[in-house]
Image (cartoon, helix red, strand yellow):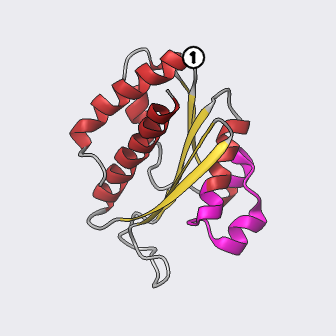
């Protein structure tokens, strides 16, 4: 279950310590969260020591232009798909100085959903040490809640992954 939003600050502090301990940088590639993950990271003073950059790639064109996600991949699977989020996570690594990336793409609502991909469908992908991971979230509630829950979950995933590499 995603962390409550008041735990985000604590999660970022722990994440910062882990990344600095490894001398690593983080990059984000965000669609449905519109930069909320990057904002949570950069709310912490001194984040320039471990946060490299954030890509807000809301449109399909931005995913292609900024992250190198093949347009054919988006056409074949849709922007909200495992294939695209994994390409976003990889693109964030390739187009930054970061060793760790987190990517999100989803449907925050209240419209835009379908029977196949309802509102609250969110793919989260992350890349660390050359390995890309991804998971599907099926969230409910308001647009604000879906975006907050996605932000918290994404930060949790990176935290857990870093914890396992120590």
Residue 29 visible in this rendered orientation of the protein: no
Above or below, 62 relative to 18: below
Q: Position of residue 67 (x, y in %)?
A: 70, 46
Q: Is residue 72 magenta?
A: yes
Q: Which image quarter: residue 76? A: bottom right
The magenta segment = 63-85
SS category of the residue bearing label 1: loop
Q: Position of residue 105 (x, y in %)?
A: 52, 58
Q: Is 3 left, or right, of 125 in this rendering? A: left
Q: In the image, what residue occupies the spot 38% across and 16% down?
A: 45
Instruction: Provide the residue designation for mark 1.
Output: 23
Q: In the image, what residue occupies the spot 47% across and 81% down?
A: 114
Q: Is residue 80 magenta?
A: yes
Quarter of the image with the N terminus is bottom left
Label count reads: 1
In the image, 89 versus 113, the foreground residue is: 89
Q: In the image, what residue occupies the spot 25% across and 43% down?
A: 5
Q: Is 92 left, or right, of 146 in this rendering? A: right
Q: In the image, what residue occupies the spot 49% across and 26% down?
A: 166
Q: Position of residue 26 (x, y in %)?
A: 55, 30
In the image, 54 versus 130, the foreground residue is: 130
Question: Mark 1, residues whose alpha carbon is within 10 Å: few (<14), some, or many (≥20)?
Answer: few
Q: Which image quarter: residue 16? A: top left
Judged by its main secondary structure, the magenta piece is helix
Residue 85 visible in this rendered orientation of the protein: yes
Q: Position of residue 138 (x, y in %)?
A: 38, 67
Q: Which image quarter: residue 115? A: bottom left
Above or below, 42 relative to 135: above
């Amino acid at each position: 279950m995603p962390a409550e939003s008041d735990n985000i600050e604590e999660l970022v502090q722990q994440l910062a310590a882990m990344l600095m301990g490894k001398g690593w940088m983080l990059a984000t590639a965000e669609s449905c969260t519109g930069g909320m993950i990057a904002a949570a990271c950069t709310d912490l003073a001194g984040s320039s020591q471990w946060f490299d950059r954030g890509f807000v790639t809301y449109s399909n064109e931005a995913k292609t232009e900024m992250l190198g996600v093949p347009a054919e991949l988006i056409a074949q699977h849709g922007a909200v798909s495992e294939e695209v989020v994994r390409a976003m996570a990889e693109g964030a690594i390739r187009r930054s100085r970061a060793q760790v990336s987190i990517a999100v793409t989803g449907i925050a609502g209240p419209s835009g959903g379908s029977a196949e991909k309802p509102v609250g469908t969110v793919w989260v992908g992350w890349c660390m040490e050359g390995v890309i991971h991804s998971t599907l979230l099926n969230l409910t509630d308001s647009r604000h809640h879906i975006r907050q829950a996605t932000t918290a979950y994404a930060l949790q995933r990176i935290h857990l992954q870093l914890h396992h590499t120590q």
